[in-house]
Every structure is written in structure tokens, then in C-alpha cells.
Image (cartoon, rainbow, N blue to C red):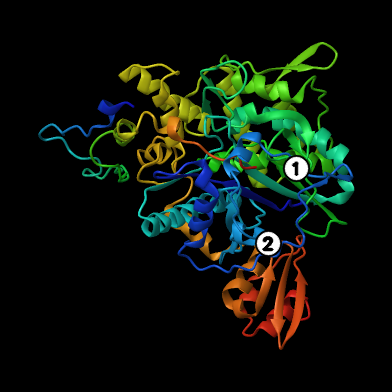
Amino acid sequence: MTDGERLPRPLSPGTKRPGEDGGPAKPEIKRPEGGNELLKRMKKVDPDQAKKYRQRSGQ
Amino acid sequence: MRRILAGVETEYGLLVEGHGAEDQIENAMALVRVYPGECLSVWDYRHESPRADLRGFQLEHLAVDPIDAKFEDGRSYGKAEDIRSDRILPNGARFYNDHGHPEYSTPECWSLRELALHDAYGETVALEAARAFAHSSGKEVKVYKNNTDFHGASYGTHESYLVPRSLGFEALYRAVAPLLVARQILTGAGKVGSEAGDWCDYQLSQRADFFMEPVNAETLYRRPVFNTRDEAHADPAQWIRLHVISGDANMMPACTARKAGLVKLALLLALDGEPPVWNLRSTVQAFQRISRDPDYRFEVELEGRSWTTAYEILESYLSAAEQTVELDEELTALIHECRALMASLAANDLGPLRKSVDWAAKRGILQSFMEEEGGSWKDASMRAFDLEYHNADPEEGLYHALEQMGEIPVYASAEEIGDRACGNEEGTRAWARAIAVTKFRSHVRNACWRTITFEIDGRLIEIELRPDMIYGRHLSEANDVGTFVRMLRGEV
């Protein structure tokens, strides 16, 4: 839920990327595109979804 | 060290566009039947005994939820085996309709990790069947890996543990019941609100509201914390299958492994060590009180006007296991993990728990949403979010979004989970079942957890799959069914 912290921030001009000077590079981590996926999904949820959800008793 | 064979069976919630609970049995039957993967429909029901009680008697009938009875309305669904629509999958798992819920029962597993991976693979099976049913019916279909409909109907996620019959009911109950009450603090799936008694904003357990008795053999109504169904799924003269019904369906595989690992610790103590002795004043009230405690003190009333806490109960199992039984690396790691999580919880630091425990992860996203968007626990949307946390579709579910965003550590890659379609290479008896239904399916007349019956040259040959044996990789090298049968008998 910390959308801002997840946004990629542009490098300032002249800044070396990690690994370019022989130091360790951060591993590539694949993130969903388009910001906070969780929040996007929550906003799509029908607020009455659970009200309409009726099940038979199972075990 | 001693190994305990275990499995997890999960009944999925089923939502079909435009349909209600009254249509659920037909829908679950249809969903299971259109499962697009390879399967064999020859389940053998002869060894099932849901009314047998571990305490040595047989129930005349199982109690039924009176609300469910109203759904029937004179409907008839056909023969019992047609209603169940059992499928045996190529990994030795069972997929069928259980009281209107698609149920995936994992193959039997030795290790906690393998069990958690197979349980996670069950989501793939349920989802593939749901997508096929959506295609065939033209309706939107969703499956949920949870245990409640928020209106008073619950459906189960059961665990099975095979232990020697010599252990007996009394020793099992004394060793396991206190643990079942306490483990929810590290394994609960979390629930918004309550479905019995007073309102609470949020509780740890999806199932707590539904327990009415400390111990009995019921599963559909008047559910107990400790279930005494005596259906061994093996030779009943030698084995008891402990049937645990008080746990929640976990989205986090790590939670599934922890849930089963804690019970295994209690069982190892009962078998080989010295289990702690706890005399709870009320098993049911203790379970429900822990589930609803907003302060995380988790106090438990004992007989004799004294008190303890869920923390102390769990720690007593961890330390007793360290001191009195032989532990493998997996169980040793489990003990360290549980201690670390309990320390964070006791300090009200939920950060580590949000990455490792379903109830804390779910609570975290709901609280954050309320802080950023407004609202309260009583809003209908909070229960909708609760439900969608358990949506098995990785493209829709809120749990899956958390994992994809890196908020929850990835327990296993999708490829590793998908590999469970091919069987359990640990060599449990599920491996033999898997080979039988894939390689020699034309000869398999019926099969269940305990046996496989082959037809060879017009003769029926029943093979008992002993649960304590290792079924080696070499079984897959059998080129004909006769050799395979001889291998299973140990003649080759």
C-alpha cells in the first residue's frame, strides 16, 4: 500500500548504475507494471461481493 | 527418525454468475467433470467410514446444517458416486465434488514442503476446472480457497496424519487438542467480522465461529475442535488417520507447512516423547477467545482457576520436541521460525507476520486501505476484500497481488508448483497410484487411498498400498502391468 515507495525513480545525470564500476549489481526483480497492483485490484472489487456470496455448508 | 504421512484436502468456495447456493451441487459436479486435465474416474468407496468414531462407536447419522436442508427443496442429484464425480489425477491426488464444493485432496506426502507445494498445486487444478466450466456454461466462475461465506456457512480444509493405532484416542486428544487451539496465532487465515455471538472487527481464524463442541465425529454441523472420524485410509487394525478439521485454508504455502508441522510435532511427542499437559477449562471457548483477541495476549483459561497463553502452549510443544524427540532439519527450522514469529507478535510487531501469516497479511492490506481510502471494518467492502484475498486466480486474487508485488516472499516458483502435476517423488504410496493411473490406466478397475484393483487377463487383483513403505522411482520402469503388480508386491 506504499505506492510512492514502489515507483522507479529516475537516475540523476552522470550517476553510475550499480555494477558498472565492478561492484555488485542488484538482481533484476520483476514487478507488475503500472504501480500498485494490489490497490488496482481492490478498487475493482465489487463492494457487495461478499454480501452476494452464499455457499452450502461443507465439511 | 519417525516420519508421519500427511495430506491436505481443501474444499473450494464456488461462485457461478447468476447462480446461488441451491445450484451449488449441480455446479460443483459440472465443474469437476469438465476438468480438462488427464484423470481417471474409478474411485473406490468401500473403505470409507465417515460415521465411525475413534472412541469406539458408530454414529447413526451425521448432523446436517438445517439451512442447507432448505436448499434441497425436493431435488435429486442421482447416485452418490455420480454426485461426487471423483477424479484421480496423474499425481495420485483426488479431485471431486464434496457437498457442493470442488475438493482437491493432495497426494500423501512425507515432508512439509512437499505437502505445501501439492496444496498450492491444487489451486491450479481448481482454477483450470473453473475456467473450463466458465467456457462450457458461458458464465463467470470463481473459486475461492477459504472456509466461510460470511453468512454462517463453512466448508473445510482438513488435514490427515497417519499414526499407529496403538496410540489410541486418549493419548491423541491430550497431545493434540491444546495445540489445535493455540496454533491459529501462527496459521490462521483471518476473517472480517463474526458469524456467531458478538460482533468483532477481525479475527484470526475463519473456522472458530463454527466450533460447538470440543470433540466429536461431526463435520457438517456441530463441528468440534478435535474430530474423531475414524476412517484410516489404510489398514484400520494398524493405523489411525488423525482427521484435523479446525484449520484454515492457507494461501501462503509457508503457512500450510507450519500448520502441518506443528501437528507433526505434537504427534511425535505423543509417539516418542513427552507431550506437554494442558487442561483447558473449555477447548471451544479458548479457541474462540484466541481468535478474537485484538490485543494479541491470547489468554487461555485452565482448570483450577489458572491461566496461560497461546504463546506458552506453543512454546511448551517446541521445547518438549527439542528435548524429547528426534527432529529433522525441516522441523528444527519450523521451531526457530515459530519462535521468531511469536516474539514479533508478542511485541505487537506485525511486520514479520505480514510476510509469513495469512491473517496478518490480510489484516495489513485491509487496515492500509482504510487508512488511505477511509471506511470501517463494518463496511461490506471489507468482507468483499477478505473474500478476494482467497480468489485462486493469480490475475485477480489479492493474496496473489501481494506475492507478485514482492510483499510476501515467493515460497516456490510457478514451475516448481506446476511440477507437482507429475507426482510426489518422495516415494509415498501416492507414487504407486500415480503410475497406475497414468501408465496402466486401462487395467485399473478402481482405486482409493488404500488400494488399487487391477484387471489382468480377466482376473481382479487388489493391491494394498502400505502407507509406511517407500515406493521407489524404479516403479516407473515397469513395462507391463504384471511386472508393476509384482513390483508392488515386492516380488521383483
Mark 2 chain = B
Q: Crowding near pointer 1: few (<14 within 10 Å), some, many (20+)?
A: some
Three-letter amino acid code of the residue under disc 2: Thr
Q: Quick check: B301 left or right of B411?
A: right
Mark 1 chain = B
Q: Quick check: B2 left or right of A25?
A: right
Q: Crowding near pointer 2: few (<14 within 10 Å), some, many (20+)?
A: many
> x, y percentage for residue B427?
66, 64
Q: Nearer the viewer, residue B207 or B344?
A: B207
Q: Which residue is mark 1?
A: B62
Residue B261 visible from this viewpoint? yes
**Which numbered tag is attached to residue B428?**
2
> x, y percentage for residue B232?
78, 54
Three-letter amino acid code of the residue under disc 1: Leu
> x, y percentage for residue B248?
59, 37
Q: Residue at x 62, y 84 (%)?
A: B479
Q: Secondary structure at mark 1?
A: loop
- Marks 2 and 1 sit apart, C-alpha to C-alpha, by 32 Å
Q: Secondary structure at mark 2?
A: loop
**Residue B168 sits in quarter:** top right
Q: Residue furthest top?
A: B305
In the image, residue B217 sits, relative to residue B47, either above or below, namely above
Tag 2 and tag 1, C-beta contact below 8 Å: no
**Residue B403 sits in quarter:** top left
